[in-house]
Image (cartoon, coloured by chain):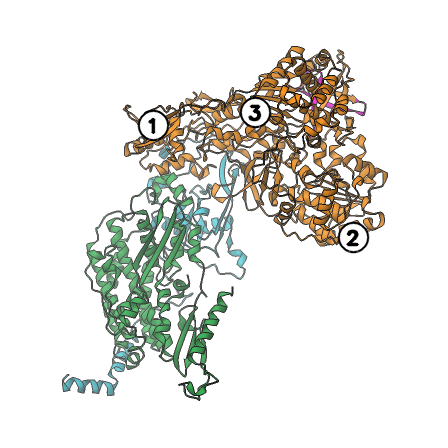
C-alpha cells in the first residue's frame, strides 16, 4: 500500500483536486484520504493511524462519507482521487465512529485504576469524546500478561489490535520484532515466533501504543501521567542528540519518553527525514543512573589514605590552596586537565578558559581525543570545516550511502534509522564496509565484509577502483591537475588485488561499490569507530575526502563526508576548544589573531603556543613528574586506557589529583579530592550533536545530594584562585560564548557548510598524499590449529551501552549485563571444540587473560569481540596502544591475539 | 396626623416603650431551655453526611480496597494527598498503594477524593477530635488512615451511603475490584458476577 | 517606576495639600480657621473587630468628622483567581466556599451557574428547585448574620444572640444536607451533590413555621429603638444615581430606591416560578437597607415554601451530560465507559469551548459575578470574580465623608462586607 506521498525527492507527484466538506482542496495524487483531511487541519479521530508508517486501517474510527458510497469508508486506507466529494462531519458519522469505539471498549478490561496508560490513553479519549455511556459490562479476555521480555510487559487484555507497535517496528525501525498471533481465541501482539522479545528494545512500540497494552517494566505502576513533571531535554548517551522528555516525580526519574507517541500522529511522512522522534534503548531505559544510589552526594577529601566526606566550603578551600601552591611552586605548567565530552558546551568552554586563563596552562584535553578529533582535524585540514557536512535529511534522501567501519545501528541507533529510512522509503543503495556481520549490513544492498582492521585499506581500494574504472569527475579533478596526478601516482603503489586479498573482498565487488558510489547523484560517506578509532584513522579520513573529491562529491548538495560520534558533545568539545590545538570556534591555538582576540576577551595572558599537551602527552608528563596536579572532570582514563600506557603510575605520581564526577570511578578512587558533579538531568546547558545542531539540556530535577553542576564548581575554584568569573548560571556562560562565537547557537538548525578543498589541494597535497596510500598490514593469516589459534581481538561499543556511564544504569545492565565472555563466531567455537561458556586463554603481546566465550552471530570467523564498556575481566589491558603522529589519538581497539582452549 | 397618635408617640417616648417591649422578649427567654452545648461534656449529634477526617477502608474480608490509582491525588483541590503506588510483590502484577499520605492540615474536607475513588476505598468519618501538640502527627499515613477506617467503619459506611457513593444492596456488598491482568493461576478466582 | 505603595502615598500627600495646606505666602487666602493647622490621621484596622475580617481604612479626620477614607485592601488576599487556573473547573468549587465564607452556598451557586453558562448545560427541574431553596436558606443565614453583627457593632448585643441561635439551626441543616456547616461545596456543575431527604424537608418546613415570628422578635429590638434609629437613619446615604454609578448592587442599591434584582431580571433557577416581591427603600440610608434585609428574610421564607410545594417529587438532581457530569458510582464499578468518564473528568476535566462568559447571580450581598475566559481544555484560562463586597468598598469614601468616626463601623456594616470575598 503506497498511500503516503510520493517520497522520491526526484519525482514530483501530480496534483489533484477534491472537495472536502464543500471546500475544494488540492492534494498530491496517490495520497491517503486521511492525510489530505489532516493537512487541512481537520482532525478526524483515528486510533491506528500514525504518520510515520503506511495506514493500516484496523481501528475503523476514521470514517468519512464519500459521495457515491452507501456506507462510511475508512479514510486512512482510502486513496484520494481527483473529483472526490467527501464529508467528514455529521451525526451519522459521529454515530458510526461511536460504534467503532464501542466495539473496542466492549472487550476492554475494567482496569483504568491500575493501568499505567490511564490519563494518556487514546481509547479513553475516544470513549470520552464520543460520549459512550450505554455500554454493557465489558467481556473479560483474561489473557495472562506476557512478562517474558526484559523491559516490556505485554498485557493483551488491553490491546485494541491497532497494529501501531508492529507497524512502527517493521516500517520505521526495520527491526520487525513483533507480530500478530491468534492465541487463546484472541488476536494478540507477540514477539516474532511467540518467544521472549529480543530486539533492539528501542521502545518505540511502547511510545506508539495508544492504550496500556505495552508497558514499561521499569516504571510499571509507579506513576500516573498527571503526577509527572515532564521536561524536554537532550539525551546524553550518543552524539545523535535526540530530544526526549524526562518525566520525574518528587525528584525521582520515573520514565523517559520520546516525542514519538500516539499523541502526535498527524504529520507528513516527508517530515520524518529530520527524525521520526523516537529514541533508542539507552535513552528510554537507561535513566536509572541519574538518581542512582551510587551517586556521589558529598565532596570527598583524602585524609590518612582514606576519602573522607567533607563540606563543600572546606573542600573548595583545600582545592584552591593546593592548586595555588603547586602553581606558585612549579608554575602553571605543572597543572593539567581532562574533561569528558558528556559535559555541556558551556562547561567545555569554561573548562578550557579555566585552564588557559585561570591556571595558565594549555595542558588540557577532552574525551573527543579518543577518536572524533581524527575526523575533525582531517576535514579541518583538507576542507576548512570542523564537522560533518550533512544532516539527517541529507542522509535520508541520499541515493547512495557508504558506511565505513561503523556498526551504526548499535552506536548511533537514530542515525541508523535515517539510513534505514533511506533504504526503505527512498530506495537508496547502501554499501556497508565493516568487519562484522552488523544489522545494517543485513539491510544494506551491498554489504562488504572486510577483514578486521582493513577498512582503511578498502577505502584505498575504492579510490583506486574509481581511478581504474575512470569514474572520475572531470570537473572536480581538472581544477587541480597536479594534485590529481599525485593522487594517481600514490594510489598506483598498492595493486587492487593485494587490497582484495587483504580485505577479503573480491576485486569485482570493490569495482561495483566504487561504481555505485561514483555514479550516484547524492552520495554520503559515513565513517565510524572502525575508521577513526583504529590505526591510521586520520589518514583514512583524508582518503575518504580524496574519494569524495575525485568522484565530484565535494560541495555538491546532498553529498559529503561524515562521521558519527560516541559521546553527546564530542563535536562541542572540538568547537569549544577543549583541546590543546584549538581555541573556541576551532581557531588554531598558535594563530596570532585568535590569541589576541581571546587574550582580550578573557583578560589574561595565554600560555605559550607550543606548550600544550594532549591526553597521551599529559600522561607522559605526569609520569615524568612535570605535571604535579591533574584536574579530571568526568573522565576515567584509568578504566579506559590499557594498563600498558601506565595510567596508574602517572596518576599515583601526582601531588594532587582532583576528580569531579557523578560517580566514584576508578580514577576517582585514586584521587586526593573528589568533587560530586551533577548529571545532565540536573543542570542547564547545551549539547552540539553530530550534525552541528546546538540542543538544549534542561534541568529536570534538583541536584542529588550536595552535587553541583560542573560549571558551578569550576567557577568557584577560579574565583578562589583569584581569576574572577562572574557566572551565576549556565546562561551567563552562554552569553559570553555568543559574543565570542556569533551564530554558534543556531536554534537547532546548523548553518550549511560547504567544503573548501582548494588550498589543501593546491598546497602540499602532492607531498602529503604520497605517504597516505600504502598497505602497512603485517597481519598473519589465521592459523588453522584447533587448540590454539590466532585471532583479531576487537573492542567496541554495543547497542545497550555507551562509555562507562551506562554501566551505572541498572536498566541497561539488566538488558545486557557484563557476561565477562569473549564474543566469538560459532564456527570458530565449533572448530576449537568450545561450548557456550567454556574458558579460554587469550594471549596478546601485552599480556594474557582467562575468560569464557560465547557465540555471537555478528562476529566474523577469525575475529573475536569484547564490549569496551566492561573492565571485568580487563580485556583492554591486552590491547597494544599506538598514538597517531598527526592528531595524538591513541588507538587501542584492535589486537592480534592467540586463543587457546583451557 | 391626629392628636391621639401624637400623644401616644409622646407617651411611648417618655415611657421608653420600645425598651420595655424588647425587655419583654428578653425576659421570656429566661424561661426557654438554653441551646448551648456544654462541650466536651455534651456532644452534638453529627449527621451521617458529615465530612470529617478521612479514612481508608478494607473489604469485609480484610483486604485493602485501595488499588493505588492516584485518582484521589489529582481530584484533590488542595493537593493534600500523596499516593505512592507500586507492584505488589506477593501478588504478582497487582498494583497497590505502598504509601498513602493525607496532609490533614491542608485538607479542605470537600469530599472530592471520596467521590473520585473508583473502588470506594476512601470515606469520611465523624471523627473531628484530633488536635495535637505536634503538627507532624497531622500528616496521616497509610497506617493511621486504616486505623481510622477500622475504628469508624460504621460512620464511613453511612457516609458513603448518605452521599450516594454506595447503595445498600447486594451488588455493593459483593463488589470487589477485580484485577483482570493478573497471571492466571489454578488458584486464581474467576471474575465476579458483575464482570461476566 | 515607583512602587505602587509609594504612588498611593504620594496621591495621599497631594490630597492633603489640596485640602488643607495653607499657602505660607498668603495665609490670609486660606478659608480655614486659623487654629486648625493639622488633620488627624487614623488607621482603622486591620485588627479591628468591626472590620469583618482584616480591612484597614485610613481615616482623615477633621475633629470627629471623616473627611476622607481610604480603604487599604489585600490583607486577606489568597490568589483565589489564580488558583482557579491551576485546577479543573470542578476543582474550583471548594475554593469558592472560601470567598464569602459565611455564605458558601451562594458562591457555589454563582460559580456553577457561570460554568453551566459556559458549557451550555440545562439543569434538571428538581435540581433548579433544590438550588433555589438552598440559595434562599443561605440568604436567610446571610441576613441573620448581617443583622446580628451589624447590631452588635452598633451596640445592640441581644439581637446577635437570637439571630445566631436561629442561624445555627440552618447551619446544622446544611451539615445534614452536605456534610459541612460553612464550607459546603454542595452545588455541582450541572446540578447538586445530594438530594433532600424526607427528614431534611421536614426540618426545613418546621423552620419555616418557626422562623417568621422570630423575625418579628428581632425587629422588636431594633425597629423603634431610638439608639438604633439614631445610628442608622440618615447614615451612609447614597443617592440612586451615585449608587448606580458606583456599581452597587443588592440591598445596598435597593436601599436607594433602585428596583434591581437579578432574581427578577435574569429569572434564573426556580425564581420565575415563585411569587415574591423585591423590597425597595427610599432614603438610601442604613436604616432602609436594614429594613430591606429584614423584608428579604420574610420573602425568602415565602420563596422556600413555594418551592417546597411546587418541586417535583421525583427527578434527577444532575444534568445528564456525559462529557461534563460525573457518572453514577455504581456504573463506575462495573462499566468501562463510566469508569473512563470518571477518570477523564477527575484527571483532566471536561473540555470547555473557547470563549468568555460573564454570569452574575443575586447573592444576599449583591451581584456576585464570575467572568471566565476559556482557551479550551479542562482549566479556565482566567477567572475573575466580581465580588459585591469589593465593589461596595469602592463607594466607602463617598459614603463616609462627613460622618462621625463612630459611623465608620456602621458604614462597613451597611455593605455587609466579608473580606474573604473582597480580597479574594
Task: Tell me which secondary structure the magenta stretch mostly adopts.
Answer: strand
Label 1 is found on which chain of the structure? A
Q: What shade has chain C been given?
A: green
Asked if residue B68 lies left or right of residue C288, the reply is: right
Question: Which span is picked out in magenta?
Answer: A844-868
Q: Position of residue A254 (x, y in %)?
A: 55, 40
Q: Residues within 10 Å of mark 3 (few under 14, many from 20)?
A: many
Image chain in cyan: B
Asked if residue A862 lies in the magenta stretch, the reply is yes
Same chain assignment for discs 3 and 2: yes
Regarding mark 2 in the picture, which secondary structure is present there? helix
Q: Which residue is mark 2?
A: A321
Q: Are marks 1 and 2 in contact (CB under 8 Å)?
A: no
Determine which quarter of the picture holds residue C34.
bottom left
Q: Position of residue B63 (x, y in %)?
A: 46, 41
The residue nearer to you, when weighing A240 against C278, is A240
Q: Which mark is residue A419?
A: 3
Q: Secondary structure at mark 1?
A: strand
Task: Please determine if labels 1 and 2 lie on a single subunit.
Answer: yes
Label whose residue precedes the other's in the sequence (3 or 2): 2
* Left or right of residue A837, residue C31 in this image: left
Front disc: 1 or 2: 1
**Disc 3 element:** helix
> What distance separates the C-alpha of mark 1 from that of mark 2?
78 Å
Q: Mark 1 packing: few (<14 Cα in 10 Å), some, or many (20+)?
A: many
Q: Is residue A498 above or below residue A206?
A: above
Chain A's colour is orange
Question: Looking at the image, which is closer to me, C218 or A209?
Answer: A209
> Quarter of the image containing the N terminus of chain A?
top left
Horizontal relation, residue C183 to residue A258: left or right = left
Amino acid at each position: 500500500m503506497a498511500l503516503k506521498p510520493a517520497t522520491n525527492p526526484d519525482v514530483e507527484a501530480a496534483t489533484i483536486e477534491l472537495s472536502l466538506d464543500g471546500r475544494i482542496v488540492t492534494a498530491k495524487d496517490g495520497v491517503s484520504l486521511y492525510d489530505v483531511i489532516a493537512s487541512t487541519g481537520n482532525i478526524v479521530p483515528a486510533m491506528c493511524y500514525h504518520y510515520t508508517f503506511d495506514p493500516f486501517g484496523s481501528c475503523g474510527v476514521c470514517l468519512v462519507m464519500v459521495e457515491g458510497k452507501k456506507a462510511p469508508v475508512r479514510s486512512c486506507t482510502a486513496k484520494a482521487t481527483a473529483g472526490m466529494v467527501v464529508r467528514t462531519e455529521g451525526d451519522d458519522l459521529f454515530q458510526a465512529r461511536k460504534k467503532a469505539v464501542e466495539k473496542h471498549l466492549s472487550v476492554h478490561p475494567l482496569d483504568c485504576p491500575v493501568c499505567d496508560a490511564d490519563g494518556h490513553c487514546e481509547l479513553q479519549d475516544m470513549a470520552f469524546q464520543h460520549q459512550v455511556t450505554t455500554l454493557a459490562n465489558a467481556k473479560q479476555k483474561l489473557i495472562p500478561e506476557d512478562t517474558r521480555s526484559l523491559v516490556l510487559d505485554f498485557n493483551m487484555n488491553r490491546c485494541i489490535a491497532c497494529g501501531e507497535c508492529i507497524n512502527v517496528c517493521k516500517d520505521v525501525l526495520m527491526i520487525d520484532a513483533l507480530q500478530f498471533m491468534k492465541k487463546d481465541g484472541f488476536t494478540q501482539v507477540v514477539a516474532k515466533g511467540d518467544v521472549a522479545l529480543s530486539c533492539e528494545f528501542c521502545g518505540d512500540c511502547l511510545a506508539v501504543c495508544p492504550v496500556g497494552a505495552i508497558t514499561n517494566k521499569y516504571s510499571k505502576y509507579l506513576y500516573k501521567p498527571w503526577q509527572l513533571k515532564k521536561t524536554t531535554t537532550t539525551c546524553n548517551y550518543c552524539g545523535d542528540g535526540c530530544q526526549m522528555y524526562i518525566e520525574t516525580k518528587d525528584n525521582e526519574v520515573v520514565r523517559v519518553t520520546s516525542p514519538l507517541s500516539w499523541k502526535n500522529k498527524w504529520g507528513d511522512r516527508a517530515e520524518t527525514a529530520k527524525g521520526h522522534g523516537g529514541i533508542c534503548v539507552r535513552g528510554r531505559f537507561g535513566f536509572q543512573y541519574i538518581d542512582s544510589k551510587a551517586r556521589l552526594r558529598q565532596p570527598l577529601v583524602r585524609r590518612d589514605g582514606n576519602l573522607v566526606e567533607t563540606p563543600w566550603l572546606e573542600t573548595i578551600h583545600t582545592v584552591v590552596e593546593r592548586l595555588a601552591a603547586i602553581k606558585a611552586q612549579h608554575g602553571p605548567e605543572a597543572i593539567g586537565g581532562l574533561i569528558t565530552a558528556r559535559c555541556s558546551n558551556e562547561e567545555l568552554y569554561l573548562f578550557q578558559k579555566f585552564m588557559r586563563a585561570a591556571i595558565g596552562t594549555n595542558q588540557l584535553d577532552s574525551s573527543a581525543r579518543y577518536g572524533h578529533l581524527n575526523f575533525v582535524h582531517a576535514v579541518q585540514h583538507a576542507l576548512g570545516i570542523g564537522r560533518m557536512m550533512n544532516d539527517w535529511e541529507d542522509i535520508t534522501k541520499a541515493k547512495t550511502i557508504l558506511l565505513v567501519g561503523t556498526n551504526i545501528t548499535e552506536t548511533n541507533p537514530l542515525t541508523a534509522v535515517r539510513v534505514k529510512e533511506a533504504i526503505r522509503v527512498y530506495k537508496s543503495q547502501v554499501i556497508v564496509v565493516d568487519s562484522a556481520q552488523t544489522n545494517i549490513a543485513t539491510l544494506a544492498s551491498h554489504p562488504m565484509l572486510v577483514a578486521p582492521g582493513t577498512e582503511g585499506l578498502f577505502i584505498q581500494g575504492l579510490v583506486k577502483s574509481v581511478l581504474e574504472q575512470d569514474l572520475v569527475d572531470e570537473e572536480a579533478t581538472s581544477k587541480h591537475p597536479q594534485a590529481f596526478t599525485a593522487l594517481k601516482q600514490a594510489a598506483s603503489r598498492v595493486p587492487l588485488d593485494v587490497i582484495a586479498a587483504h580485505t577479503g573482498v573480491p576485486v569485482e565487488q570493490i569495482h561495483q561499490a566504487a561504481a555505485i558510489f561514483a555514479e550516484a547523484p547524492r552520495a554520503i560517506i559515513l565513517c565510524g569507530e572502525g575508521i577513526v578509532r583504529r590505526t591510521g584513522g586520520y589518514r583514512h579520513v583524508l582518503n575518504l575526502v580524496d574519494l569524495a573529491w575525485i568522484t565530484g562529491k565535494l560541495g555538491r548538495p546532498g553529498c559529503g563526508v561524515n562521521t558519527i560520534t560516541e559521546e553527546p558533545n564530542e563535536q562541542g568539545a572540538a568547537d569549544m576548544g577543549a583541546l590543546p590545538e584549538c581555541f573556541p570556534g576551532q581557531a588554531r591555538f598558535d594563530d596570532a589573531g585568535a590569541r589576541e582576540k581571546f587574550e582580550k576577551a578573557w583578560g589574561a595572558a595565554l600560555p605559550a603556543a607550543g606548550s600544550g599537551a594532549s591526553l597521551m602527552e599529559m600522561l607522559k608528563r605526569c609520569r615524568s613528574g612535570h605535571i604535579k596536579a591533574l584536574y579530571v572532570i568526568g573522565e576515567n582514563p584509568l578504566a579506559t586506557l590499557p594498563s600498558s600506557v601506565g595510567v596508574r603510575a602517572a596518576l599515583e605520581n601526582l601531588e594532587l589529583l582532583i576528580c569531579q564526577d557523578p560517580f566514584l570511578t576508578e580514577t576517582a578512587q585514586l584521587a586526593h579530592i573528589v568533587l560530586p558533579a551533577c548529571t545532565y538531568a540536573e543542570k542547564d546547558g547545551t549539547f552540539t550533536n553530530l550534525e552541528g545542531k546546538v540542543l538544549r539540556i534542561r534541568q529536570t530535577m534538583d541536584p542529588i545530594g550536595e552535587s553541583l553542576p560542573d560549571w558551578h564548581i569550576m567557577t568557584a575554584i577560579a574565583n578562589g584562585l583569584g581569576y574572577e568569573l562572574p557566572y551565576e548560571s549556565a546562561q551567563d556562560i552562554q552569553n559570553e560564548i555568543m559574543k565570542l562565537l556569533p551564530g554558534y547557537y543556531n536554534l537547532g538548525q546548523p548553518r550549511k557548510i560547504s567544503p573548501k578543498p582548494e588550498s589543501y589541494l593546491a598546497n602540499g597535497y602532492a607531498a602529503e598524499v604520497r605517504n597516505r596510500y600504502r598497505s602497512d598490514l603485517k597481519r598473519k593469516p589465521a592459523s588453522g590449529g584447533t587448540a590454539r589459534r590466532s585471532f583479531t581481538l576487537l573492542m567496541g561499543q554495543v547497542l545497550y551501552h555507551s562509555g562507562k556511564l551506562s554501566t551505572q544504569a541498572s536498566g541497561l545492565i539488566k538488558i545486557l549485563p557484563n557476561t565477562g565472555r569473549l564474543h566469538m563466531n560459532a564456527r570458530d567455537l565449533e572448530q576449537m571444540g568450545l561450548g557456550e561458556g567454556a574458558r579460554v586463554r587469550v594471549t596478546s603481546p601485552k599480556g594474557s587473560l582467562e575468560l569464557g566465550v560465547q557465540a555471537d552471530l555478528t562476529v566474523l570467523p577469525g575475529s573475536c569481540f569484547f564490549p569496551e564498556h566492561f573492565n571485568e575481566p580487563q580485556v583492554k589491558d591486552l590491547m597494544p596502544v599506538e598514538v597517531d603522529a598527526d592528531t595524538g589519538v591513541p588507538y587501542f581497539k584492535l589486537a592480534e591475539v592467540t586463543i587457546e582452549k583451557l | 396626623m391626629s392628636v391621639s397618635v401624637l400623644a401616644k408617640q409622646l407617651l411611648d417616648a417618655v415611657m421608653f416603650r420600645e425598651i420595655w417591649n424588647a425587655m419583654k422578649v428578653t425576659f421570656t427567654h429566661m424561661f426557654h431551655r438554653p441551646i448551648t452545648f456544654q462541650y466536651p461534656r455534651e456532644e452534638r449529634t453529627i449527621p451521617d453526611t458529615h465530612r470529617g477526617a478521612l479514612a481508608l477502608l478494607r473489604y469485609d474480608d480484610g483486604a485493602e480496597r485501595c488499588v493505588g490509582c492516584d485518582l484521589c491525588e489529582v481530584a484533590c483541590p488542595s493537593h493534600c494527598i500523596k499516593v505512592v503506588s507500586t507492584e505488589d510483590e506477593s501478588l504478582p502484577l497487582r498494583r497497590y498503594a505502598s504509601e498513602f499520605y493525607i496532609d490533614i492540615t491542608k485538607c479542605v474536607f470537600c469530599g472530592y477524593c471520596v467521590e473520585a475513588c473508583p473502588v470506594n476505598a476512601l470515606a469520611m468519618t465523624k471523627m473531628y477530635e484530633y488536635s495535637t501538640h505536634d503538627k507532624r502527627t497531622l500528616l496521616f499515613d497509610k497506617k493511621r488512615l486504616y486505623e481510622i477506617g477500622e475504628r469508624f467503619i460504621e460512620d464511613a459506611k453511612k457516609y458513603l451511603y448518605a452521599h450516594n457513593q454506595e447503595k445498600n444492596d447486594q451488588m455493593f456488598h459483593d463488589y470487589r475490584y477485580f484485577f483482570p491482568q493478573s497471571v492466571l493461576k489454578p488458584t486464581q478466582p474467576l471474575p465476579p458476577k458483575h464482570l461476566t | 517606576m515607583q512602587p505602587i505603595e509609594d504612588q498611593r502615598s504620594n496621591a495621599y500627600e497631594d490630597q492633603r495639600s489640596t485640602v488643607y495646606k495653607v499657602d505660607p505666602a498668603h495665609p490670609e487666602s486660606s478659608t480655614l480657621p486659623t487654629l486648625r493647622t493639622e488633620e488627624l490621621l487614623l488607621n482603622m484596622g486591620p485588627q479591628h473587630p468591626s472590620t469583618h475580617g482584616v480591612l484597614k481604612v485610613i481615616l482623615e479626620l477633621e475633629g470627629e468628622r471623616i473627611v476622607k477614607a481610604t480603604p487599604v485592601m489585600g490583607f486577606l488576599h489568597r490568589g483565589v483567581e489564580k488558583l482557579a487556573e491551576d485546577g479543573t473547573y470542578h476543582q474550583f468549587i471548594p475554593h469558592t466556599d472560601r470567598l464569602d465564607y459565611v455564605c458558601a452556598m451562594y458562591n457555589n451557586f454563582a460559580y456553577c451557574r457561570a460554568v453551566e453558562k459556559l458549557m451550555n448545560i440545562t439543569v434538571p427541574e428538581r435540581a433548579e428547585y433544590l438550588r433555589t431553596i438552598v440559595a434562599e436558606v443561605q440568604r436567610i443565614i446571610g441576613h441573620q448574620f448581617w443583622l446580628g453583627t451589624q447590631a452588635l457593632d452598633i451596640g445592640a448585643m441581644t439581637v446577635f444572640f437570637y439571630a445566631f441561635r436561629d442561624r445555627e439551626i440552618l447551619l446544622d441543616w446544611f451539615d445534614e444536607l452536605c456534610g459541612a456547616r460553612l464550607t459546603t461545596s454542595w452545588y455541582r456543575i450541572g446540578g447538586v451533590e445530594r438530594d433532600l431527604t424526607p427528614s431534611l424537608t421536614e426540618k426545613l418546613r418546621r423552620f419555616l413555621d418557626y422562623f417568621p415570628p422570630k423575625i418579628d422578635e428581632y425587629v422588636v429590638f431594633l425597629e423603634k429603638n431610638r439608639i438604633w434609629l439614631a445610628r442608622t437613619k440618615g447614615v451612609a446615604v447614597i443617592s440612586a444615581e451615585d449608587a448606580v454609578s458606583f456599581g452597587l448592587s443588592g440591598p445596598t442599591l435597593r436601599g436607594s430606591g433602585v428596583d434591581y434584582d437579578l432574581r427578577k431580571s435574569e429569572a434564573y433557577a426556580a425564581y420565575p416560578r415563585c411569587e415574591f416581591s423585591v423590597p425597595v427603600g427610599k432614603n438610601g440610608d442604613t436604616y432602609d437597607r436594614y429594613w430591606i434585609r429584614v423584608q428579604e428574610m420574610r420573602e425568602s421564607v415565602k420563596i422556600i415554601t413555594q418551592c417546597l410545594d411546587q418541586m417535583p417529587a421525583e427527578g434527577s438532581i444532575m444534568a445528564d451530560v456525559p462529557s461534563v457530569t460525573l457518572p453514577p458510582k455504581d456504573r463506575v464499578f462495573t462499566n468501562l465507559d463510566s469508569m473512563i468518564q470518571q477518570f477523564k473528568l477527575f484527571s483532566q476535566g471536561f473540555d470547555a469551548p473557547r470563549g468568555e462568559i460573564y454570569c452574575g447571580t443575586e447573592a444576599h450581598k449583591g451581584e456576585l459575578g464570575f467572568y471566565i475566559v476559556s482557551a479550551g481544555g479542562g482549566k479556565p484560562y482566567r477567572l475573575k470574580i466580581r465580588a459585591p463586597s469589593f465593589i461596595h468598598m469602592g463607594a466607602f469614601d463617598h459614603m463616609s465623608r462627613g460622618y462621625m468616626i463612630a459611623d465608620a463601623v456602621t458604614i462597613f456594616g451597611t455593605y455587609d462586607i466579608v473580606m474573604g470575598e473582597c480580597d479574594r
